[in-house]
């Protein structure tokens, strides 16, 4: 069974690459997708395509809507949505992605540290698994694809 997995959330570390590399080393049949991880491009895509805005609100609004085209399509096509909440930045977009995936009844895996547990309790409640690290996610994906587990 080939799974489609969308990797959402924090874009300032290489957690996506770690998951993809570890799944590839296990030869898991998974097709990965993710949001644009180039922060500047993601922020500016709306004005780059549709033209400049005088007010930052409309600049951000254009970018958010164009990013939503990519994000919503990817989440809709995914079998599993993994959402990582990082340490440094508040990822409101990640919370939206988790809610959207949950509303579509997608299998949702959340990753964050213990410090964020209280703030993310409602997000965690919607998830089928709440993890703390990449290895836990890779093990869940392996079990989901193959029905096996090896450490």
Image (cartoon, helix red, strand yellow):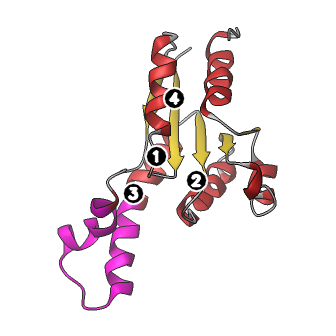
Start and end of the magenta stretch? 40-67
Callout 4: 10 Å neighbours few (<14), some, many (20+)?
Answer: many
Callout 2: 10 Å neighbours few (<14), some, many (20+)?
Answer: some
Callout 1: 10 Å neighbours few (<14), some, many (20+)?
Answer: few
Closer-to-camera residue (66/118): 118
Picture residue at 60% right of the left edge, 46% below the top: 83
Quote the CA–CA distance across marks 4 and 2: 15 Å
Mark 3 or mark 4, earlier in chain? 4
Q: Which residue is mark 4?
A: 19
Mark 3 or mark 1, earlier in chain? 1
Q: Which residue is mark 1?
A: 13
Q: Position of residue 30 (x, y in %)?
A: 49, 22
Q: Are marks 1 and 2 in contact (CB under 8 Å)?
A: yes
Q: Which residue is mark 2?
A: 86
Q: Does the magenta-highlighted stretch encompass residue 43?
A: yes
Instruction: Name the mark nearer the viewer: 3 or 4.
Output: 4
Mark 4 or mark 2, earlier in chain? 4
Q: Which residue is mark 3?
A: 69
Q: Position of residue 40 (x, y in %)?
A: 29, 63
Q: Image height check: is 68 above or below 30?
A: below
């Amino acid at each position: 069974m080939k799974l489609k997995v969308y990797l959402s959330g924090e874009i300032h570390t290489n957690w996506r690459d770690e998951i993809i590399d570890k799944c590839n080393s296990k030869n898991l049949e998974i097709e990965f997708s993710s949001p644009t991880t180039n922060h500047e491009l993601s922020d500016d895509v709306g004005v780059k395509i549709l033209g400049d805005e005088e007010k930052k609100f409309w600049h951000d609004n254009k970018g958010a809507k164009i990013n939503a085209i990519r994000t919503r399509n990817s989440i809709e096509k995914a079998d599993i949505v993994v959402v990582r909440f990082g340490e440094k930045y508040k990822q409101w977009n990640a919370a939206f992605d988790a809610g959207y995936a949950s509303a579509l009844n997608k299998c949702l895996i959340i990753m964050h540290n213990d410090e964020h547990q209280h703030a993310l309790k409602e997000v965690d409640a919607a998830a089928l698994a709440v993890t703390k690290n990449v290895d836990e996610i890779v093990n869940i994906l392996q079990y989901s694809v193959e029905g096996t587990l090896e450490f």
